Image: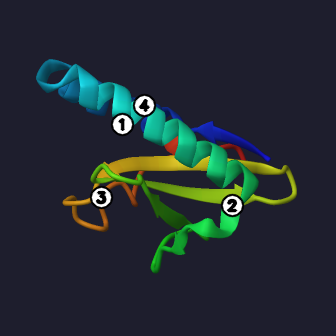
Amino acid sequence: MQVLYTDEAIEDVREILDYLSDRSPATARRFEMELGALTAKISKYPEIGFPVEGAKRSYRKAELRSLPWSVVYWTDAVRETTWVVIVRHRSRHPSYGMKRGTSGDPPP
């Protein structure tokens, strides 16, 4: 199954990498590695994340192994595609990013 990122999720990753690169390039590299590993795992096992209650779609949330960021995604089984919708720090409110407009939603 392929994993794609919405525009907003790409922007989330850019902002995180900008923030981390200024403070700790080693942590920025670790973030990239862990995000890639998690994306690969989600690609093979899309049901690994925990269901997100109250979401407008059947969102799931998975966390990076050793860094405090989470990935919120949903799977379109018909198209065999998983969409990463939000990449957020775990200290953010659970509703952060959940009301993103249609520009961040993948095509129906």
What amino acid type is highlighted by mark number 1?
A: Asp
Residue 72 circle label: none
Residue beneath label 4, please?
Answer: 32
Q: Earlier in the sequence, mark 2 or mark 3?
A: 2
Q: Secondary structure at mark 2?
A: helix
What amino acid type is highlighted by mark number 4?
A: Glu
Which residue is at the front of the view, 62 or 76? Answer: 62
Number of other residues with Cα within 10 Å of mark 1, as a class: few under 14, some 14 to 19, many 20 or more: some
80 vs 91: above or below: above
Which residue is at the front of the view, 79 or 47? Answer: 47
- Tell me where residue 48 appears, x and y as whole percent: 61, 67
Residue 46 circle label: 2
Residue beneath label 3, please?
Answer: 96
User: For the residues carrying marks 2 and 4, which lies nearer the camera in this image?
Assistant: 4
- Tell me where residue 67 appears, x and y as whole percent: 30, 49
What amino acid type is highlighted by mark number 3?
A: Tyr
User: For the residues carrying marks 3 and 4, which lies nearer the camera in this image?
Assistant: 4
Determine the CA span between mark 2 and mark 1.
21 Å
Determine the CA span between mark 1 and mark 3.
11 Å
